[in-house]
Structures are given as structure tokens and as C-alpha cells.
Image (cartoon, rainbow, N blue to C red):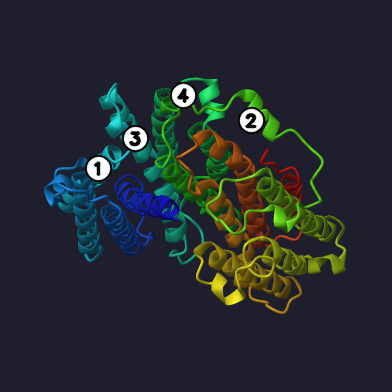
């Protein structure tokens, strides 16, 4: 749990860093229009800097709390560490950027405050690079640090710029974006993407030493996942880039459709930032030698096999010893759970497809299938606890894993009822409909950023590699549904067909899930 919390804090810090750095660079290089709400831009910069400072402070506090203070340990050991120095520099740079943004927010011109703002941006980038894998390398450290700084600069400028583009656009009265500013932004984004790719490719060459490392380690697969999501973002960005250039320089750009695609581009970009945060919790592929999975091991996990629809007997499981090593019966129990859950999801996807493709009205009740899934999860999630195991119902709330599972069951029930009410018109606000894609986006992102085990890297990797395509499909379902809702064009049925088909694919993948 602590590993997941650390990844989430790093992801939040990267998002705050993007908002802060992207805002400063946009104000410096892009915004030259009186119609643009600069006060709002500087407020978002300040909020982003505050998020970086708080997230870094919490990460540092969590690290200190988990230190093994053995005999002879003193506070001087902590004070002398590079990580503490880097953390302090990042927090100080964030506070400086926060103060500078709030000051210039009240001024008509930035003037000499650019020195403070750009200096704080440099401080953030340097400290971010020194808290990455590059700082721990012996060979080529300088080059890797420079590449990491470039990579983070490009990501912050691009994704943070998208955030300010969306937020700033809502501040314009006419609802149209100034075409000259849009052209400057697209050139700015193109440069940022180029910088991001140069840094990313260089880091990949430094940390991934071959095809087997790319496909046989968690680090390599996460790099591939980032690349796949990034490719999707680039496709959206390219479409927006050429769309902007189709308009004359003096004509305001009609932004309803363009803005919706920018929202999706931003959402996927934020997912990339959290995936990048997950990479920091993994050892570089070049360092994982003995624990690399062979191509055959990876291919076997994705080889279709008839789903297991029979469960081992409950008394075959070591329910009395939660710390016992996993047995064949444990794995069979887990596979059965995934396969039956896949059936529920597949039914939901097929009903949703029937509603989207054929306009069958009664099929809109597909969210009620979530209730059956929740009941199955309640029965099967914890074989050592109520209702199947010896641990009583109330005793289970004292066990963190059981508590988490029960909370998740309640969320599934609530989510199913909520979405059913949206689909049947009982909740009519358009904002309620956005809950479904947002939940799918968060769920898909969590599948991509969950904590990874470190005691047996190979077995953990082979267990978790099947989560990656599920996470990517979750993102596809989320943002296709988002487009369907936000475009508000009944004649454009492509997004609806994409997310419904994606839901079917999720169910099919769960039916193919295997742990052996």
C-alpha cells in the first residue's frame, strides 16, 4: 500500500509540475492576447506549484517514517542524503514559483519577475532530474540527467500547456479561441513534443538494453505502455494541429469540437504522467538480468485458453494462514474469479453494444449487471473471511485487505445504480453522465500505476502483465465515452461504438486471464 501511495504522490507532483512549468512557459512564449485570462493562468500556476510542494513534503515524510533506525543511526545521516537535499530544493523552488505567480497575478506586466519565475522552473527541473533513476547511475550520469531534464521539460510544457489551453478557453467570452494564439500554441506544443521524444528515446536506450528487456521486465512493458498512450495523444494532437491551420488568421476558430479533443488529449497526457511516476518505482530494465521473463513465458500468458468455470473447493485453500505461500489452488481460485467477472463485464459490453449499435431501448439497463458482479465479488474476494471463511463479518473490518475489498464492492454497487439512473433519465444533468468515463479513466490509470512487488520480480511481472492491456482498454472506454457525451452530436456515433466495443474487449481479456 505504501508503494502505491508513493507512486500516486509522485504522479500528483508531476501533474502539479506540468501545471506550474507549462503555465509559465505558455505565458512567456504563447499568450499575446488581451482576451486570454492571465489571472486565471497564474492562479493555476500557483496551485500547481503548491501541489508539487505538498506532494514532495508528504513523500519525504513517508520515507522518513519508514526508515530503519538501527543502532548508530543519527539525523545527520538523513541530512547528508542527496534525496533530502533534492527534496528541499524542489520544495523551495515550488514555494518561490507559488509566490511569484501570486505576485504577477496582481500586476499588468510581469517585468523583472520573469527572473524569479524562470529560475524557479529551472530549480524544479534540476531537482526532478536528480530524484530520478539518472541520479543513481554510475556510467553516463551526466547525459542521463540532461536527458531526464529534457524529457520532463517537454512533458510539462506540452501537458501543462494543454491544461492552460482548456482552462483559459473557458475564460473567453465568445467561446472561440484567437487563431493567432492557437497557431503559436500548436508550434509551442510541437517543440515540446520534440523535446519530450528526444529525452524519452535517449532514456529508453540508456535503461532498456534490448528487446528481451523491453518485453520481459515490468520497466520495459511500462515504457511500451507509455509509448502506446503517447501515440494516441500524438494522433489527437496532430489532428488538432492541422485543424487549426485550416482557418484564416483573422477568423476566430470554432472550438466546440476542437476543445473536446483537447480535453481527451489532456486526460491521456495526465495518465502518461502517472505511468511515468510508476516507472520511478521500478528498477531499470538494464539492471534486471536474472529475473527477466523469456519471450515464451510472456507469450504463454497471452495464449488463449478456455476459461476456467469450475472453482477449487474452499477447504483446499490455506485460509487459516494468510501469509502462506501461494498454492495451485490459490491460483485456480483467482483465475476462476477473474473469468466469472469477465462474464459479467462481457454481458455488460454486449448489452451496451446492442444499445449503441442497434438502438435497442431495453439494453440501456446494462449497468444493473454491476449488481451481480458486486454480489459475486463479495462472496469470492476473501476466502478466509465471511461469508465463506472462518473470519466473522465484523472481524473482517479489522483486516485492511478485507476492508478494502468490501469498500470496493460498495463502490461497484453505487456506481452501477448511479449509471443506471443516468441511462434511464432519472439523473438528467449532463455532469452526472461524466462520472462513468471519469471512473473508467481512474480505474484504467490505477491498473497501469499499481505497486509492483520487489521480492520476486519475474513472477510478479508475469502476474501483472495482463493488467496492462486492461488498463489501456479502460482508458479507451473512458475517453471514447467522454467524447460521445461532450460532442453532443447524435449523428456522430463512432465514439459510442468505440467505448462499447472496448467494454466487450475488457470482458474477453478477463476471460483469458491466467496465473499459470
| Circles 4, 3 touching at the beta carbon (< 8 Å) | no
Q: Nearer the viewer, residue 485 or 65?
A: 65
Q: Nearer the viewer, residue 332 or 266?
A: 332
CA gap, disc 3 and disc 1:
12 Å
Residue 392 at x, y percent in the picture: 61, 73
Q: Nearer the viewer, residue 268 or 350?
A: 350
- Which residue position holds label 2? 298
Q: Residue at x 81, y 50 (%)?
A: 309
Q: Quadrant of residue 80?
A: top left
Q: Residue at x 39, y 60 (%)?
A: 35
| Circles 1, 4 touching at the beta carbon (< 8 Å) | no
Q: Is residue 176 shown above or below 137?
A: below
What is the quadrant of the C terminus in the image? top right
Q: Earlier in the sequence, mark 2 or mark 1?
A: 1
CA gap, disc 2 and disc 1:
37 Å
Q: For marks 2 and 3, give the one nearer the viewer.
A: 2
Residue 127 bears which disc, if any? 1
Residue 210 at x, y percent in the picture: 50, 20
Which secondary structure, mark 2? helix
Amino acid at each position: 500500500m505504501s508503494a502505491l501511495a508513493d507512486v500516486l504522490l509522485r504522479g500528483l507532483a508531476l501533474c502539479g509540475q506540468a501545471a506550474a512549468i507549462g503555465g509559465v512557459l505558455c505565458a512567456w512564449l504563447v499568450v499575446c492576447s488581451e482576451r486570454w485570462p492571465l489571472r486565471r493562468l497564474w492562479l493555476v500556476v500557483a496551485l500547481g506549484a503548491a501541489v508539487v510542494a505538498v506532494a514532495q513534503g508528504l513523500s519525504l515524510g513517508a520515507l522518513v517514517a519508514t526508515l530503519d533506525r538501527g543502532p548508530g543511526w543519527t539525523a545527520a545521516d538523513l541530512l547528508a542524503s542527496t534525496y533530502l537535499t533534492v527534496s528541499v530544493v524542489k520544495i523551495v523552488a515550488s514555494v518561490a514559483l507559488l509566490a511569484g505567480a501570486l505576485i504577477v497575478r496582481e500586476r499588468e506586466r510581469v517585468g523583472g519577475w520573469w527572473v524569479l519565475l524562470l529560475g524557479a522552473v529551472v530549480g524544479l527541473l534540476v531537482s526532478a532530474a536528480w530524484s530520478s533513476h539518472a541520479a543513481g547511475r554510475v556510467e553516463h550520469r551526466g547525459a542521463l540527467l540532461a536527458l531526464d531534464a529534457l524529457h520532463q521539460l517537454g512533458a510539462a510544457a506540452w501537458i501543462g500547456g494543454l491544461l492552460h489551453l482548456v482552462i483559459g478557453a473557458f475564460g473567453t467570452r465568445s467561446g472561440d479561441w484567437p487563431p493567432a494564439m492557437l497557431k503559436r500554441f500548436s508550434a509551442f506544443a510541437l517543440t515540446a513534443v520534440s523535446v519530450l521524444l528526444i529525452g524519452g528515446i535517449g532514456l529508453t536506450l540508456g535503461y532498456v538494453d534490448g528487446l528481451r528487456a523491453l518485453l520481459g521486465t515490468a520497466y520495459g512493458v511500462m515504457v511500451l505502455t507509455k509509448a502506446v498512450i503517447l501515440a494516441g495523444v500524438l494522433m489527437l494532437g496532430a489532428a488538432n494541429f492541422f485543424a487549426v491551420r485550416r482557418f484564416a488568421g483573422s477568423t476566430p476558430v470554432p472550438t466546440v469540437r476542437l476543445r473536446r479533443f483537447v480535453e481527451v488529449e489532456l486526460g491521456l497526457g495526465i495518465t502518461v504522467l502517472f505511468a511515468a511516476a510508476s516507472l520511478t518505482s521500478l528498477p531499470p530494465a538494464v539492471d534486471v538480468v536474472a529475473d527477466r521473463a523469456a519471450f515464451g513465458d510472456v507469450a504463454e500468458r497471452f495464449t488463449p485458453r478456455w476459461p476456467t468455470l469450475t472453482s477449487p473447493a474452499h477447504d483446499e485453500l490455506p485460509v487459516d494462514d494468510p501469509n502462506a505461500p501461494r498454492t495451485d489452488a490459490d491460483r485456480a481460485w483467482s483465475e476462476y474469479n477473474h473469468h466469472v467477472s469477465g462474464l459479467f463485464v462481457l454481458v455488460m459490453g454486449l448489452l451496451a453494444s446492442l444499445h449503441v449499435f442497434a438502438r435497442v431501448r431495453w439494453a440501456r439497463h446494462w449497468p444493473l449487471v454491476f449488481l451481480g458482479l458486486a454480489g459475486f465479488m463479495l462472496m469470492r474476494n476473501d476466502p478466509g473471511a465471511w461469508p465463506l471463511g472462518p473470519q466473522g463479518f465484523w472481524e473482517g473490518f479489522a483486516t485492511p485487505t478485507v476492508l478494502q475489498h468490501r469498500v470496493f464492492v460498495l463502490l461497484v454497487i453505487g456506481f452501477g445504480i448511479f449509471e443506471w439512473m443516468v441511462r434511464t433519465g432519472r439523473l438528467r444533468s449532463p455532469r452526472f453522465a461524466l462520472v462513468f468515463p471519469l471512473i473508467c479513466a481512474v480505474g484504467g490509470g490505477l491498473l497501469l500505476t499499481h505497486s509492483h512487488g520487489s521480492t520476486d520480480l519475474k513472477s510478479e511481472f508475469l502476474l501483472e502483465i495482463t493488467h496492462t492491456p486492461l488498463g489501456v482498454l479502460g482508458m479507451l472506454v473512458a475517453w471514447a465515452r467522454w467524447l460521445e457525451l461532450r460532442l453532443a452530436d447524435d449523428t456522430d456515433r463512432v465514439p459510442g461504438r468505440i467505448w462499447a466495443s472496448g467494454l466487450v474487449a475488457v470482458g474477453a481479456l478477463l476471460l483469458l486471464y491466467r496465473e499459470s
